[in-house]
Amino acid sequence: MIHYLWPVLWMGLIFFLSTDAGSSSNTFNLLEPTLRVLFPQMTQHTMLLMNSILRKLAHVMEYAILSYLWLRAFRQGKQDWSPRWALWALAISVSYAMLDEYHQRFVTARTSSLADVGIDSLGVLMTQVYLFIVLRQPLPEPESGKKTGRSE
């Protein structure tokens, strides 16, 4: 059961970030001072655009991580890959993205968006495709003898 702890904890973090704490104005308040130092000539409009872009990238990343954690939980330390595990990881992660957006409907400083579910799902899908490619690669064969460094 310990394998399922990490994705559940990550879902808790996503839930927290879906509250007022993760609102656009709060993330902008964190981002603006850094942008002002790095790019003192940046306009307010460009800063707001950067905030929006970074928030959408955060959607992709948080759900990519969730998808990875679920697949890792289903693998339970095994080194192989199963389409069933990948589909479950995908289904749970996308379902949670939908629930997360539904939850945001009830948070004053947040909005609910099907586009965000699509962005979240993109992160989930990209992760599962990547893991399919990486985990389906055959493991390298162990060397049968020690190399001595001498030519024979």
Image (spheres, grey):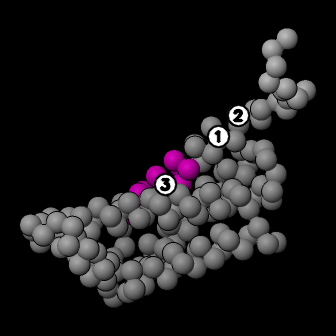
Taking 126 as reference, is 23 left or right?
left
Label 3 sits on a secondary structure element that is helix
- Which is the main secondary structure of the residues drawn in magenta? helix
- Distance (Cα) linking label 2 and label 1: 6 Å
Which of the marked residues, 2 or 3, is nearer the chain's N terminus?
3
Q: Residue at x 39, y 86 (%)?
A: 21
Crowding at dot 2, Cα within 10 Å, few <14 / some 14-19 / many 20+, comes out as: few
Crowding at dot 3, Cα within 10 Å, few <14 / some 14-19 / many 20+, comes out as: many
Circle 2/circle 1 CB separation < 8 Å: yes
Q: Where is mark 2, residue-wise? A: 137
Amino acid type, mark 1: Val
Label 1 sits on a secondary structure element that is helix
Up-down: is 41 above or below 27?
above
Q: Please identify the residue farthest to the top as the structure is shown.
A: 152
Up-down: is 61 above or below 107?
above
Magenta highlight range: 116-127
Q: Residue at x 58, y 74 (%)?
A: 11
Q: Residue at x 51, y 47 (%)?
A: 126
